Amino acid sequence: MKTLAAALVLFAGSALALPDPRFDGKPDAAAPVVKAKASAAAISEADSRVWVELEAPDKAARQAAVNAGISVEEVKPGTAAGFATPKALARAKAAGLKVRTTVSLRQRFGALDFPEKDAVYHNYKELESDMRSLAARAPDLVSIFSIGKSTLGKDLWAARLTKGAKGSQPSKKPGIVFMGTHHAREHLSTEVPLLLAKHLVDNRAEPEIARLLETRDIYFIPMVNPDGAEYDIEGGKYHMHRKNMSKNADGSTGVDLNRNYAWGWGGGGASPDPGDDTYRGPSAFSEPETKAVKAFVEARPNLKTLISYHTFSELILYPWGGSDAQIPDAKALAAFRAMAGEMAKMTGYTAEQSSDLYVATGDTCDWAYAEKGIFAFTFELTPKSMWDGGFYPGAAAVQRVFQANIRPALYLIDLSDDPLRAAKGASVFASAPASKSQGEATK
Ligand code: 0X9
Ligand code: ZN
C-alpha cells in the first residue's frame, strides 16, 4: 500500500505536494490506496472554490465544517476534506477549525488528462435512448415515463419494471425506487441504477428475478439532476458541479437537491448561503427536481423501500441524517440496521446512521422515511477516497461497482413486501441470518 506522501508525488506541481507531517514514509494502514491516475478534470478560471483539508479529530469538528458550508467529501482519522467557497472557508476558520491544506480546484485537478474511456458513462441523451431501448426490448415488462421537468426543462425519466402495470397505472404490489445523481458530479450513481434495470431485463428468466418482477413494482430514476449532470461534462471536461442549475437571487447557480427535501429543512448541515455547494434552496421543495420526486413518491403509496445512490466513500447510510437521534420505532430501527448491515457485507461498504457521517438536514431519505415510512438508504458508492478517483473514478469502475451492487438491490427488492422481516434474516438474497450481520452486531 502506498502512503499519501507517496501519492502526493503523483501530483507534482500541485500545492498538495508538500511534506505531510502525518506520514513518515512507512506503510500506513490508514492511508488510501493509490490505484491509478486520479480524476481528470478541467475547472473554469472563475471557479474560486478550494479543496480544503481540516483538522477534524471528532464528529463535532466535522459538523462545524459542514455547518460552515463546506461539502465534506472525505473523512479520515483526524481529518475531514471537501470543497469550500472562500466565504465558507472563512466561516470555518472563524469557527476555530484548523486548516491543514487548501488547494484551488485548478491546481488540484486542472492539470490531469481527460480519461478517454469515460465515454462509457451515459450523458442525458444516451440515458434516455438506453431507457427507451430497454422498454422496446421488453414491452411486457418495462415502461418509461417522465416524472416531471428539471429546472431547464428536461424530462426526468423513470423506468418501471413489473408485470401487469405500465407507466403511472396504480399497483398494489410492494414498490421500490432506485434513484441516482441528485448530485451532478456523481455520474457513477446514474450508471448503477441504469445497469440494474438492464440486469433485471437480461435475467428475467431466472426464477428468483422472475418472481421479483411478478410480485414487486420496481422503479428506476437514474438521473434526478440532468441539468447539473450535463453541465458537469460540458465541453468534454468535468466541472466538479454538485448542485442543480437554478439561478439564485444573488446570481450564483444551484441548489443542493439533497438539502432541499422538507424533513428538517433549514436546520443544521445545510447552508443558507446560495454560493455554497450545500445550499438548501429558498424553501423546502423549491426545486422542480425535488418537487417531481415528491409527487412521484406521493402518487405511489405502495413504495416501501428506496435507494438513493451517491458517490463516494463506500457507505450505506440510514436515517436519521438530519439529527443524531435514532429513529424512534425500535422494530424499524432493527430492520434498518439489519438491512444496512447485510448490504454492507455484500458490498464491503460500511453501514452507519447517516448522521454518524455528519448531520445534514433536508436529504431524500429522512423525508422518505419520516413522511412516508419508506425504508430509505443512501449508498455512497465507490471509490473510498478522492485519491482513488473521487467523483471521477474512470470507466473501469462502472462494471465493478455495478456488479457489487446487484445483490443488495435484489435483497432490498425482495424485502419490499415487509422490510421488518429483515431483522429475522428472511430473504433468499441474504448471505446469513441478519442476527449475525454487522447491523445487528452494533445494537
Ligand atoms: O452530503 C450528502 O448529501 C451525501 N454525501 S455526498 O458526498 N454524496 O454529497 C450524504 C448524505 C447523508 N445524509 C446525511 N448525513 N443527512
Ligand atoms: Zn451526493
Image (cartoon, rainbow, N blue to C red):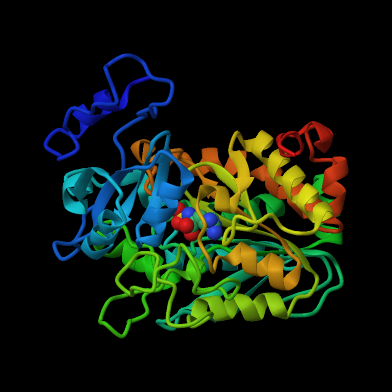
Q: Determine the residue positioned at 76% across, 67% down.
A: 373
Q: Is residue 286 left or right of residue 214?
A: left
Q: Is residue 293 left or right of residue 181?
A: right
State which quarter of the image contains the N terminus: top left
In front: 439, or 293?
439
Percent of width and height locating residue 128: 51, 68
Q: Residue furthest left?
A: 13
Percent of width and height locating residue 5: 25, 25
In front: 103, or 211?
103
The number of discs equals: 0
Q: Residue furthest top?
A: 26
State which quarter of the image contains the C terminus: top right
Q: Is residue 100 above or below residue 194?
A: above
Percent of width and height locating residue 298: 71, 79
Rendering quarter of residue 173: bottom right
Q: Is residue 40 above or below residue 13?
A: below
- Residue 296 visible at all: yes
Q: Is residue 246 left or right of residue 131?
A: left
Percent of width and height locating residue 194: 57, 57
- Residue 205 visible at all: no
Q: Determine the residue positioned at 38% across, 62% down.
A: 242
Rendering quarter of residue 237: bottom left
Q: Determine the residue positioned at 27% across, 28% down.
A: 7
In front: 35, or 287?
287
Q: Is residue 277 above or below residue 191?
A: below
Q: Is residue 424 left or right of residue 315?
A: right
Q: Determine the residue positioned at 49% across, 61% down.
A: 181
